[in-house]
Amino acid sequence: MNISDSERLATILEKKGYEPAKSADKADLIVINACSVRQRAIDRVFDKIHKFKNKKIVLAGCVLEADRKKLKGRVEFWKPDEYFDTIAPLRQNKFSAFVPIMTGCNNFCSYCAVPFTRGREKSRRPAAILNEAKLLIKKGFKEIILLGQNVNSYRSDKTDFPKLLKKLVELPGNFRLNFLTSHPKDMSDELIEIIAKNDKIISAIHLPVQSGDNEILRKMNRRYTVAHYENLIKKIRAAFKKCRPSFPAPEISTDIIVGFPSETKKQFQNTFNFCKKINFSKAYIAQYSPRPGTAAVKLKDDVPTKEKKRRWRILDTLVNKFEHPDE
């Protein structure tokens, strides 16, 4: 998402007459594409703004309102919905290209700042997405990656995500489709069937579970249960086995947060057991850290840092098969 945003920001600036500088020190304009997922990321943004305080600065991406107030008068703000519909020129990567289809989020997971930084969900028009895809296919790109905080909830007029995928796979050309990220509560049977039936759609699905314990999922405001998620995985694997019997089973990757407030050792064990049962191909594991402005910040961050790291290492070893040396 950040790479795609940066490509579109560069396109807008080039149209305004700017050219890339050889170094930040020689630049007339500094553009910072922020991410507010973790506090340390936004802390680095503040450091860069201080470092280049004598230059004109544009701050784009995910920025909380509280941080905007602190930086008022020091930077020019560009909101994501002001540029996510911009078509970027030919990328450096000649194989895959990012195509944002929506921005924002309506889910309000208790640990996440996205609804407060990117706002509510806003979908691009199908015609704009199809036109960009046609351009990329003509340029020779082999993989088109559809982007959104929750692509499953894409909707523009009468076109939802399954209908959009149908339109895209019907485009002529030698290319494959990929997409991220999906939300388990919005992964419909229709969507699963379309993905499984179409060879142009890559047989890999990123489906964040975040926890394998129902009580923690409730506190995260994820609005699904462990049983619901497990049933989705069974449906996905069964659909692929039926529609693509000669293909390997689809790869299922996920996101997991360890050390969420009040997560006990038993609840973490539930997550461990769940990961072992599902057999994810890959997991992006994060140690929980409080984010100002989110609902979870009101909860006591009571899992010690050392314990969070221990849980992270255990899951990383299990899912990603990475062997950590003993400390």
Image: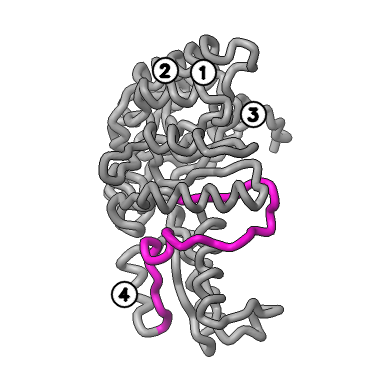
Answer whether residue 205 is visible to the viewer in this image: yes
The residue under the point 63% across, 60% down is 90
Q: Which mark is residue 69?
A: 4
Count every numbered label the image shows and give the total.
Answer: 4
Q: Position of residue 242 (x, y in %)?
A: 52, 10
Is 321 placed left or right of 255 in the picture? right
Q: Please report the bounds of the magenta region as a residue range.
A: 74-100
Residue type at numbered disc 1: Ile
Distance, label 1 to label 3, CA atoms, is 15 Å
Q: Is residue 315 visible?
A: no
Q: Disc 2 marks which residue?
A: 230
- Give the CA distance from mark 3 to mark 2: 21 Å
Circle number at residue 257: none
Q: Which residue is mark 1?
A: 278
Q: Which mark is residue 317?
A: 3
Please tell me which residue lies in front, 207 or 278.
Answer: 207
Residue drawn at x 35%, y 25% is: 188
Left or right, 67 with reference to 43? left
Earlier in the chain: of badge 4 and badge 1, it is 4
Image position, residue 184 (x, y; %): 38, 29
Identify which amino acid the numbered label 2 is placed on.
Glu
The kind of secondary structure element at disc 3 is helix
Residue 219, by quadrant, is: top left
Identify whether 51 is placed above or below 192.
below
Spatial CA span between label 3 and label 4: 42 Å
